[in-house]
Image: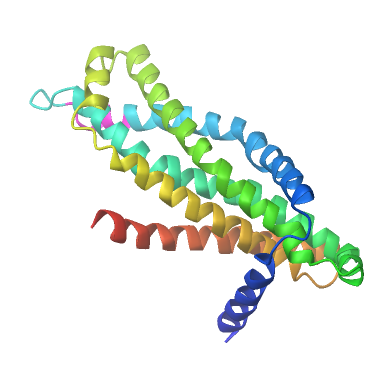
């Protein structure tokens, strides 16, 4: 029953979030600010994770198919498809659920317990739309760029790992990442990233918005936001894979 309660409350929350903004100039300024805070500030961790992720995928693939009958370029092929299909969208989404999700939940939760949201309601402002909608729009707009950067950095990390260790010669790796390339895989990853961004931002904002208590409850809400976002990312990853690739 708690699941149905939260599902209904989350639906009502989304209805309030997507009401028409009162002042478009303020709304667009907030979007730019949130893009910098949620997206640009996450670029460093995305690049670090992606380069090591690409390197590990390449080396593990090379070690596991070290057979004379299997050409070396299959390492680049396997690394490319793994990075495009799963790691640069799903794994990066899970990482951002921890970083961005906890940030959103703690920020809005702190505003709730310090009665700043109540003050906005008294002034006749829609707090859900004013505080949450810019975060949702900003994160949905910036995450495709983060995923594209993750793809490039991940493939480059695999190239460097294979070349420097001598496990995969550079020409073989480059041929592998070009071999039988399917452009839809990139579109598939971007579609998933947009859905994940919406889930992370709205679920985290929901838990922060409905905090009751003090600082301890804000911390618990942040934890619940990260857990709920991660579960929904894995669930929708399965659903979107079945819909788009089946």
* Magenta residues, start to end: 60-66
Q: Position of residue 172 (x, y in %)?
A: 22, 17
Question: What's the residue at 68%, 52% (across, down)?
Answer: 135
Pick whichever, 153 or 55, lies toward us: 153
Give the image quarter of residue 78: top left
Residue 125 left/right relative to 67: right
Q: Residue 140 placed where, x, y %?
A: 56, 49
43 falls in the magenta region:
no
- Name above or below for residue 44 compared with residue 197: above
Please report the residue visible at 29 percent of the width from the left and 60 percent of the height from the top: 242
Which image quadrant for residue 11? bottom right
Residue at 57% x, 64% y is 228
Q: Quadrant of the C terminus?
A: bottom left
User: The N terminus is located in which quarter?
Assistant: bottom right
Q: Main secondary structure of the magenta part?
A: helix
Compared with 203, 91 (above or below) is above
Q: Quadrant of residue 14?
A: bottom right
Q: Nearer the viewer, residue 4 or 53?
A: 4
Judge whether 137 appears above or below 57 on screen. below
Query: Does residue 61 show up magenta in the picture?
Result: yes
Q: Is residue 215 left or right of residue 29?
A: right
Q: How is the image coloured?
A: rainbow
**Residue 229: horizontal and vertical position, in percent?**
56, 60
Residue occupying the point 32% across, 56% down: 241
């Amino acid at each position: 029953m708690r699941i149905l309660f939260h599902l209904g409350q989350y639906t009502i929350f989304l209805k309030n979030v997507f009401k028409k903004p009162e002042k478009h100039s303020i709304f667009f300024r907030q979007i730019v600010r949130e893009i910098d805070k949620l997206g640009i500030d996450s670029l460093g961790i995305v690049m670090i994770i992606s380069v090591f992720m690409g390197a590990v995928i390449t080396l593990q693939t090379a070690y596991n198919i070290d057979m004379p009958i299997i050409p070396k370029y299959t390492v680049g092929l396997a690394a490319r498809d793994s990075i495009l299909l799963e790691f640069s969208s799903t794994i990066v989404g899970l990482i951002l659920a921890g970083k961005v999700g906890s940030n959103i939940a703690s920020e809005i939760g702190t505003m709730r317990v310090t009665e700043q949201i109540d003050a906005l309601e008294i002034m006749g402002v829609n707090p859900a739309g004013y505080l949450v909608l810019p975060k949702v729009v900003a994160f949905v707009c910036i995450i495709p760029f983060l995923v594209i950067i993750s793809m490039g950095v991940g493939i480059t990390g695999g190239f460097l790992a294979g070349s420097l260790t001598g496990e995969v010669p550079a020409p073989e790796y480059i041929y592998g990442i070009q071999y039988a390339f399917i452009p839809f895989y990139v579109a598939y990853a971007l579609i998933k990233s947009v859905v994940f961004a919406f889930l992370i931002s709205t679920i985290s904002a929901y838990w922060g918005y409905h905090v009751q208590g003090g600082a301890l409850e804000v911390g618990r809400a942040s934890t619940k936001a990260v857990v709920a976002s991660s579960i929904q990312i894995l669930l929708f990853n399965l659903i979107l894979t079945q819909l788009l690739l089946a």
